[in-house]
Image: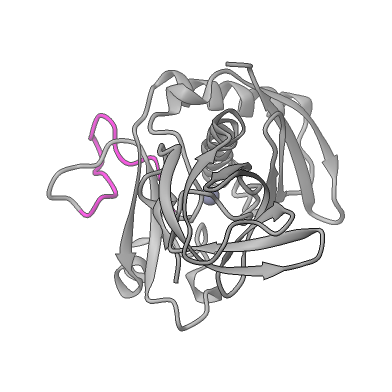
């Protein structure tokens, strides 16, 4: 199984790996590596792009995870056993990280202040949308949501990720915000993404009166920035109805 280095080294841009398998798809090939920093599409976050360099340089145009992580390149690709250097298109990836952290802030605000559960989201490198269970947001609601997101950006909250055993995660995570019951039983460890300051020797949830308790804590396999300040200014650009009791919110982040 490919060592998914991006789960820990979310800020890593370059890595060395060995080619384990190459699947010939005609005009393109899919390359399996022993380790990777490339993020495979999932959880609303698009796949990383970049290059693999060995005997020559191949452009990675897609990354998908099924039984393994497959890096799509043009032509025949590298040979099995070849050592390659992988490099992530950092501008694209960093934009996805900023949008993903912004999406978590938005989901947390919607849940805390509107009792609206996130039902889906799609991030891009220049805009994002989120669907949630709610009847109808007014323009004033959208202005309030935008202001609250920008407050959390200005608060410069730390963002951390780590894995928890499934049983502990089931005890400690809000079952409404993270539907652990929907995960296959084979999954025994859950990756957690947490925003806000951790309290030493506490259960991680923060206590009343703590100056900066943990603001949000959910299961997520995506890549995030390390501080909400990196997200930059948020603009909520619109909403639309997605059916009965389902709303879509669209937002953009300022350019870096
Ligand atoms: Zn996420």
Q: Above or below — where is 253 with respect to 12?
A: above
Quarter of the image where the N terminus is located: bottom left
Q: Main secondary structure of the magenta part?
A: loop
Q: In the rendered image, which quarter contains the C terminus?
A: top right
**Considering depth in this image, is 107 or 32 the residue closer to the camera?**
32
Of residue 8 and residue 162, the one placed in the foreground of this image is 8
67 relative to 215 in the view: left or right: right
Residue at image coords 14%, 44%? 200
Residue 208 on image: x %, y % = 26, 40
The image position of residue 135, as x and y in percent, is 78, 48
Q: Residue furthest front?
A: 55
Q: Would residue 217 be visible to someone looking at this image?
A: no
In this view, the residue in front, 184 or 113, is: 184
| Residue 46, placed above or below residue 147 | below
Residue at figure coordinates x 81%, y 65% from the top left: 26
Would residue 145 be found to the left or right of residue 222 on screen? right
Q: Is residue 242 visible?
A: yes
- Residue pictured at 76% horizontal, 58% vertical: 28
Q: How is the image coloured?
A: one colour
Q: Is residue 204 magenta?
A: yes
Q: Report the side of 29 relative to 156 (left or right).
A: right
**The quadrant where residue 76 appears:** bottom right
Q: Position of residue 184 (x, y in %)?
A: 52, 80
The location of residue 178, given as percent across then percent down, is 50, 61
Whether residue 237 is situated above or below residue 14 in the rendered picture: above
Residue at x 47% of width, y 40% of height: 224
Residue stretch rendered in magenta on the structure: 203-218
Seen as rendered, the residue at the extreme bottom is 185
């Amino acid at each position: 199984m490919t060592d998914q280095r991006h789960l820990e080294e979310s800020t890593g841009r370059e890595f060395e790996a060995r080619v384990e398998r190459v699947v010939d798809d005609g005009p393109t090939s899919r390359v399996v590596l022993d380790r990777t920093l490339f993020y495979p599409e999932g959880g609303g976050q698009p796949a990383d792009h970049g290059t693999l360099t060995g005997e020559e340089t191949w452009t990675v145009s897609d990354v998908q995870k099924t039984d393994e992580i497959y890096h799509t390149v043009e032509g025949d690709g590298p040979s099995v056993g070849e050592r390659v250097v992988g490099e992530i298109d950092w501008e694209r990836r960093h934009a996805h990280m900023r949008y993903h952290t912004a999406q978590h802030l938005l989901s947390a605000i919607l849940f805390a202040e509107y009792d609206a559960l996130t039902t889906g989201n799609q991030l891009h490198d220049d805009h994002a949308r989120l669907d949630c269970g709610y009847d109808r947001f007014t323009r004033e609601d959208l202005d309030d949501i935008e202001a609250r997101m920008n407050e959390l950006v200005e608060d410069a909250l730390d963002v951390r990720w780590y894995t928890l055993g499934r049983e502990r995660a089931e005890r400690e995570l809000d079952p409404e915000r993270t539907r652990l019951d929907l995960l296959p039983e084979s999954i025994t460890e859950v990756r957690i993404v947490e925003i806000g300051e951790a309290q030493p020797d506490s259960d991680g949830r923060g206590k009343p009166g703590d100056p900066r308790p943990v603001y949000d804590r959910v299961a997520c396999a995506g890549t995030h920035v390390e501080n909400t300040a990196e997200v930059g200014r948020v603009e909520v650009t619109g909403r639309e109805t997605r059916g009965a009791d389902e709303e879509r919110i669209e937002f953009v982040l300022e350019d870096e």
